[in-house]
């Protein structure tokens, strides 16, 4: 966003149309930055949820290991504690179900996380491309305003001669054409040697 502040604050354009275009472009950049910020915030929240889910799955694995050990210990004393053994098996099954559920949740969150990262990358790439287009538009607007100012100054300057007047007349607004080739084709500012 700072990129556009320097462009608009440094502008000395007195043309209301130019100022309006600059304002629209700056507003567009600001809105797009808000979208990027929101996407990054959502991504951060999803990453935190994913980390919590992974920790829960690790805890469930520990619970399963503990339940398996408990079941083995209880099986050794099966004759003395048949009822306790049944409880341990039930606990093991519940821990396994919990582990499977947490693993599934972690898998879904991993997919969501990857999709969100891809979405954020895409939004950032679109913004970068839009920034470049906006910067190009601003440069064209400023060049066009400068050319018009130069054209007005050239039309009152008698020493400029007819060549300058013809050059100014050949320029068309909004197209970037600054001259006409021998065959009548428009020459842009970047095309002329």
Image (cartoon, grey):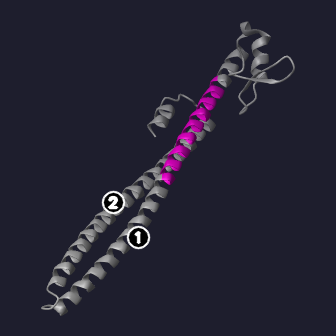
The answer to whether residue 78 is left or right of residue 7 is left
**Residue at the (53%, 44%) spot, across then down:** 125
In the image, residue 11 sits, relative to residue 26, either above or below, namely above
Give the extent of the magenta segment.
Answer: 118-146
The answer to whether residue 5 is left or right of residue 22 is left
Find out whether residue 47 is within the magenta segment.
Answer: no
Q: Nearer the viewer, residue 145 or 90?
A: 90
Residue 43: which numbered mark, if any?
none
**Residue at the (32%, 76%) spot, across then down:** 96
Quadrant where the image shows the C terminus = top right
In the image, residue 183 sits, relative to residue 70, either above or below, namely above
The answer to whether residue 127 is left or right of residue 184 is left
Work out which residue is located at the far top of the displayed protein and give it. Answer: 159
Residue 104: which numbered mark, if any?
1
Query: Image quarter for residue 77?
Result: bottom left
Residue assigned mark 2: 48
Residue 25, position in %: x, y?
56, 42
Q: Nearer the viewer, residue 147 or 3?
A: 3
Query: Image quarter for residue 167?
Result: top right
């Amino acid at each position: 966003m700072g990129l556009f502040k320097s462009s608009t604050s440094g502008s000395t354009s007195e043309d209301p149309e130019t100022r309006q275009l600059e304002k629209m472009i700056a507003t567009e950049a600001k809105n797009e930055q808000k979208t990027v910020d929101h996407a990054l915030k959502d991504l951060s929240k999803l990453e935190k949820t994913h980390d919590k889910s992974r920790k829960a799955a690790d805890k469930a694995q520990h619970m399963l290991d503990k339940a398996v050990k408990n079941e083995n210990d209880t099986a050794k004393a099966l004759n003395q504690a048949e009822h306790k053994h049944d409880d341990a098996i039930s606990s093991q099954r519940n821990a396994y179900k919990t582990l499977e559920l947490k693993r599934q949740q972690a898998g879904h969150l991993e997919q969501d996380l990857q999709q969100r990262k891809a979405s954020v990358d895409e939004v950032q790439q679109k913004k970068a491309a839009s920034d470049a287009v906006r910067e190009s538009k601003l440069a064209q607007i400023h060049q066009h305003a400068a050319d018009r100012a130069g054209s007005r100054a050239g039309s009152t300057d008698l020493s400029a001669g007819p060549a300058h007047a013809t050059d100014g007349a050949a320029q068309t607004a909004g197209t970037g054409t600054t001259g006409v080739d021998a065959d009548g084709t428009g020459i842009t500012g970047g095309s002329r040697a």
